[in-house]
């Protein structure tokens, strides 16, 4: 692919699905979604726990960048609600670019969390890693260790 510097005579039409997937893939290893600060009971708190709880913040930030949802979110449930209100539909099998929501899981600190990420094809997904604290590539079922609860698709990704 060649680089183009548009002139007044050239018409440049963004290819949103391709750019969306490139941004998702290029996010692997990024610390961009580590922190989100809020006042909790009057105290400044990093509600993302320095990247441990950043899956919804990561996914909703990319979706918001492409105007696929109305606002950014800190929780899976609020992200899914916005997705549904923004026209994303439930599908049975993941398509490239679809959103995957995994079942609740109990972590070592006894916290229970759902998880959300992007399906990128070839049985692979990218989501924020609880352990690594940044977006990582993995099998879309975590090699059969985590059940997919919901898959959402937007027709703008065709």
Image (cartoon, rainbow, N blue to C red):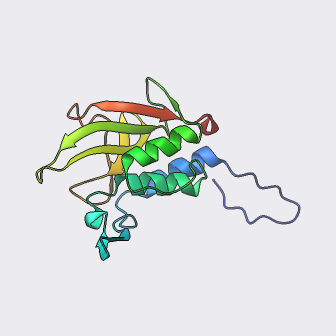
Residue 33 coordinates in the image, percent (x, y): 38, 64
Residue 10 coordinates in the image, percent (x, y): 84, 58
Q: Is residue 108 left or right of residue 51?
A: left
> Height in image: 23 above or below 150?
below
Residue 96 coordinates in the image, percent (x, y): 49, 36
Residue beneath the point at 88% across and 61% down: 9
> Height in image: 146 above or below 54?
above
Identify the residue at the far front of this view: 41
Q: Is residue 140 left or right of residue 80?
A: left
> Height in image: 122 above or below 39?
above
Identify the residue at the far right of this view: 9
On the image, which quarter does residue 150 sit in?
top left
Residue beneath the point at 45% across and 42% down: 80
Identify the residue at the far top of this view: 92
Q: Is residue 9 left or right of residue 91?
A: right
Camera-nearest residue between 71 and 122: 71
Q: How many marks?
A: 0
Residue beneath the point at 25% across and 39% down: 104
On the image, which quarter does residue 46 sit in?
bottom left
Camera-nearest residue between 94 and 149: 149
Residue beneath the point at 61% across and 52% down: 67
Q: Quadrant of the C terminus?
A: top right
Residue 135 coordinates in the image, percent (x, y): 35, 55
């Amino acid at each position: 692919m060649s680089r183009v510097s548009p002139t007044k005579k050239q018409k440049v039409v963004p290819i949103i699905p391709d750019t969306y997937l490139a941004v998702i893939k290029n996010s692997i290893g990024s610390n961009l979604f580590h922190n989100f600060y809020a006042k909790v009971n009057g105290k400044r708190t990093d509600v993302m726990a320095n990247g441990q709880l950043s899956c919804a913040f990561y996914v909703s930030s990319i979706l918001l960048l492409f105007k696929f949802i109305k606002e950014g979110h800190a929780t899976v449930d609020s992200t899914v609600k916005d997705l549904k209100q923004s026209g994303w539909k439930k599908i049975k099998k993941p398509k490239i670019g679809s959103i995957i929501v995994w079942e609740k899981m109990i972590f070592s600190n006894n916290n229970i969390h759902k998880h959300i990420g992007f399906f990128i094809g070839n049985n692979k997904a990218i989501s924020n890693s609880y352990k690594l604290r940044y977006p990582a590539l993995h099998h879309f079922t975590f090699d059969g260790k985590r059940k997919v609860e919901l898959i959402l698709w937007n027709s703008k990704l065709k």
